Image (cartoon, grey):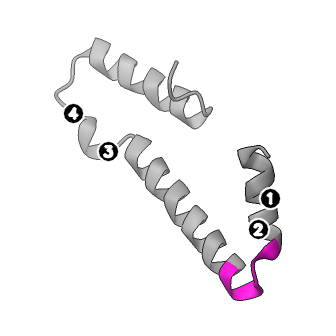
Amino acid sequence: MSVKAKFKTLVRELDGEALDELSRSVASELEGRRQKGAIKIENIHPLMSAEEKRQAMEDIARVLKGNRDA
């Protein structure tokens, strides 16, 4: 049995409370990953060169489009 099939079986067997907890855990993990990959405003400094600002704008646009690794 594949891992995906095992996971689906496990999820189907969870009671409502356990399923809610799993949902909260997944949501928390996803938010943590978003925060880790987020561009932080403190990284954009007013004394940056024009090239650094251009690169920062491109990075922000790339992340907002969901292409974090490009």
Which residue position holds label 1? 8
Secondary-structure class at tag 4: loop
Going from N to C along the chain, the mark reached first, 1 or 3, is 1
Point out the frontmost of discs 1 and 3.
Answer: 1
Q: Are marks 1 and 2 in contact (CB under 8 Å)?
A: yes
Q: Is residue 34 left or right of residue 65?
A: left
Amino acid type for the residue under numbered disc 1: Lys
Secondary-structure class at tag 3: helix
Which residue position holds label 3? 41
**Mark 3: few/some/many CA within 10 Å (<14, 14-19, 20+):** few
Q: Extreme left residue here?
A: 47
- Say which mark, if any, is on residue 58: none
Going from N to C along the chain, the mark reached first, 4 or 1, is 1
Determine if residue 67 is in view.
yes
- Say which mark, if any, is on residue 11: 2
x and y, in percent, of residue 16 in the image: 76, 85
Point out the frontmost of discs 2 and 4.
Answer: 2
Determine if residue 38 is in view.
no
Most foreground residue, 47 or 37: 37
Distance between the Cα atoms at labels 3 and 4?
11 Å
Distance between the Cα atoms at labels 4 and 1?
50 Å
| Count of numbered circles in the view | 4
Amino acid type for the residue under numbered disc 4: Pro
**Mark 1: few/some/many CA within 10 Å (<14, 14-19, 20+):** few
Task: Please tell me in which quadrant of the rendered image residue 67 appears.
Answer: top right
Secondary-structure class at tag 2: helix
- Say which mark, if any, is on residue 46: 4
Q: Is residue 46 left or right of residue 56?
A: left
Determine if the magenta segment contains residue 16: yes
